[in-house]
Image: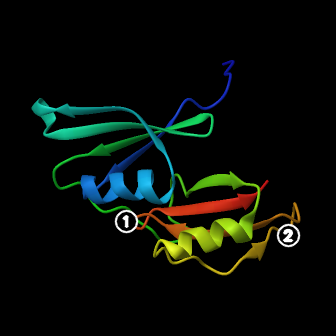
Amino acid sequence: MQTTGIHHVAIICSDYERSKKFYVEVLGCSIINETFRAARNSYKLDLQIGKDQIELFSFPNPPTRPSTPEACGLRHLAFAVEDLEKTVLELQSKGVEVEPIRVDEITGKRFTFFQDPDALPLEIYQS
């Protein structure tokens, strides 16, 4: 298999309007396209963040996601940022709780975690 990169990350949310507001107003994603799929009673929101894309889906009554640190499966989504402290302060000013900054023992880079409205772990990583 030869790939040219990751096309998008898909996220399923429990409260579409709350998650849409979080990803657009708090994280600063741009809306590419918003589609209501009547047959599924579901929204699909295509978002742009930097050069990358997030697909935000809503479904009626989605099961909760295991959010424990070592749950099997995709662990978290990490965003590269140039100024970690500035980003932390910006998130906190918008009411987002952010964990203390840590240092990656392998790369020496600084990072921290916060959560989306459904407790999906999100990371900001000093680029």
Instruction: Identify which amino acid the numbered label 1 is placed on.
Output: Pro
Tell me the residue at 72%/71% (across/down): 85
Residue indicated by mark 1 = 117
> Label 2 to label 1, Cα distance in Å?
29 Å
Q: Secondary structure under badge 2?
A: loop
Q: How many marks?
A: 2
Say which mark, if any, is on residue 80. Answer: none
Q: Position of residue 72 (x, y in %)?
A: 51, 58
Asked if marks 2 and 1 touch (Cβ < 8 Å), the reply is no
Q: Position of residue 47 (x, y in %)?
A: 45, 38
Instruction: Find residue 82 and report its horizontal and vertical position in percent.
Output: 76, 55
Q: Is residue 113 left or right of residue 110?
A: left
Most extreme residue toward the top is 2
Q: Is 112 on the left-hand or right-hand side of 96?
A: right
Residue 27 at x, y percent in the picture: 51, 56
Tag shown at residue 105: 2
Mark toward the start of the polypeptide (2 vs 1): 2
- Image quadrant where residue 33 sits: top left
**Foreground: disc 2 or disc 1:** 1
Which residue is nearer to you in this view: 26 or 35? 26
Q: Quadrant of residue 51?
A: top right
Secondary structure under badge 1? Answer: loop
51 or 74, which lies in front? 51
Query: Disc 2 marks which amino acid?
Result: Glu
- The N terminus sits in image quarter: top right
Q: Quadrant of residue 56?
A: top left
Residue drawn at (11%, 30%), measured in percent from left and top? 39
Looking at the picture, does residue 21 appear above or below residue 49? below
